[in-house]
Amino acid sequence: MEPFIFNTTKSLVFRPGAAAELAQIAGSLVGGTCLFVTDPGLRGLGLCDPAIASLEKAGIKVTIFDRVEADPSLSTLMDAVKAGRENGVTGVVGFGGGSSLDIAKLSALLLGSGEEIDGAWGVGNAKGPRLPLVLVPTTAGTGSEVTPVSIITVGAEEKRGVSSPVILPDIAVLDADLTLGLPPAITAATGVDAMVHAIEAYASKSANNNPLSKLLAREALRLLGANIETAVSNGRNVEARGAMLLGSMLAGQAFANSPVAAVHALAYPIGGTFHVPHGLSNALVLPHVLRFNAPAAASLYAEIAHDAFPHLDRETGDQALCADFIEELAGLSKRLGMQARLREVSIPEDALPRMAADAMLQQRLLVNNPRELSEADALTIYKAAW
């Protein structure tokens, strides 16, 4: 067996209503002054209020930073850090989707270590230490609460990442009640995103692909595949919501240690340039990338096909089962009401060559793809998706 490293969040709390007990769960960890990072939508809906009230009732001073946007910018990160420094915070809570959690991770790092962000970009460059960190996801998709990665938009379109176990949180609080109000479109996009994490982790060519990641990816697909349509059609079903949240977290643990590949690499220009939500960006290219990968990965996709879609016939052979798996994924996106073509999200055909060139900048992801992919291949995939 090949050697590997597996890192994940130290402590997980999975319980409906847990966010309203945040002080009991994490008050002693975050200390007397807490930076609470979230977005204006969640703040306006009052979804944060029980968690904030819990902290304040315990005597913890809460500095609320609620200006996180989708695909958060470097200026937003630095504003959050400034707010933390001005208030002398002793811990950080991230509350929201992947964007808020990403800002919280790097805020805890920069506030705790005093290092400059320019020295932390890339893999393993963050020095630490960071401040105590608690993450509370409100979507079932990114798995950010168990990943050592934070993605920030620098300038108009460039996305840069920090990848280091240093930014894994101390505690992740998984409260399915927080996801009950998610609109169907967001539920669908984030759910497919989580499925992509599991699929790409399982088939990753990374030298650190390992038995734990594979096991977690398969259980994630079992939970996600069985519950995503219910969660989209009946968003008040707390059992389905809980299964999606747990599946998302398991997929996050898988790809945090066995990294994602070409689906994400090709999704980044869609989101970065045209501001398409990340989960939908992944869904738009998913079947086309998997068809490209099939000559090298059919047996791997066949191994997980039945986990996501138990009705598929295991006896058809790897090639046929792989093809059926890809068609099921494409059909799932349509059943969930997601756009199926790049043109449907207002991406012009003449933008495809530039997108292909931009996708090739994501070599940290492309090296994990089971089949080597060139710029010409990326363009062919985009044309198929258009």
Image: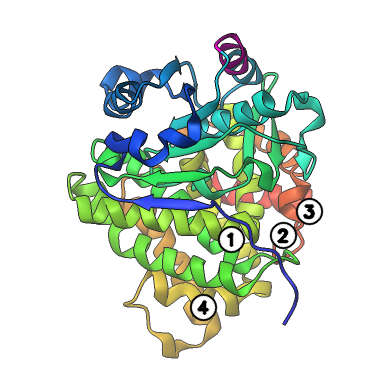
Give neighbour class at mark 4: few <14, some 14-19, many 20+ (Cα, 10 Å). many
Front residue of 87 and 317: 87
Amino acid residing under circle 2 = Asn
Q: Mark 3 = which residue?
A: 374
Secondary structure state at the residue bearing disc 4: helix
**Mark 4 and mark 2: Cα distance apart in space:** 19 Å
Label number found at residue 191: none
Q: Mark 4 = which residue?
A: 302
Query: Which residue sits at x=33%, y=26%?
Result: 58
Could you tell whether 369 is left or right of 331 in the image?
right
Q: Mark 2 = which residue?
A: 368
Chain-order first, disc 2 or disc 3? 2
Q: Which residues are magenta?
A: 80-87
Query: Which residue sits at x=64%, y=45%?
Result: 266
Chain-order first, disc 1 or disc 3? 1
Chain-order first, disc 2 or disc 1? 1
Relative height, residue 187 to residue 69 (above, below): below
Front: mark 3 or 4: 4
Front: mark 2 or 3: 2
| Contact (Cβ within 8 Å) of mark 2 with mark 1 | yes
Q: Mark 1 = which residue?
A: 200
Front: mark 1 or 3: 1
| Contact (Cβ within 8 Å) of mark 2 with mark 3 | no
**Mark 2 and mark 1: Cα distance apart in space:** 9 Å
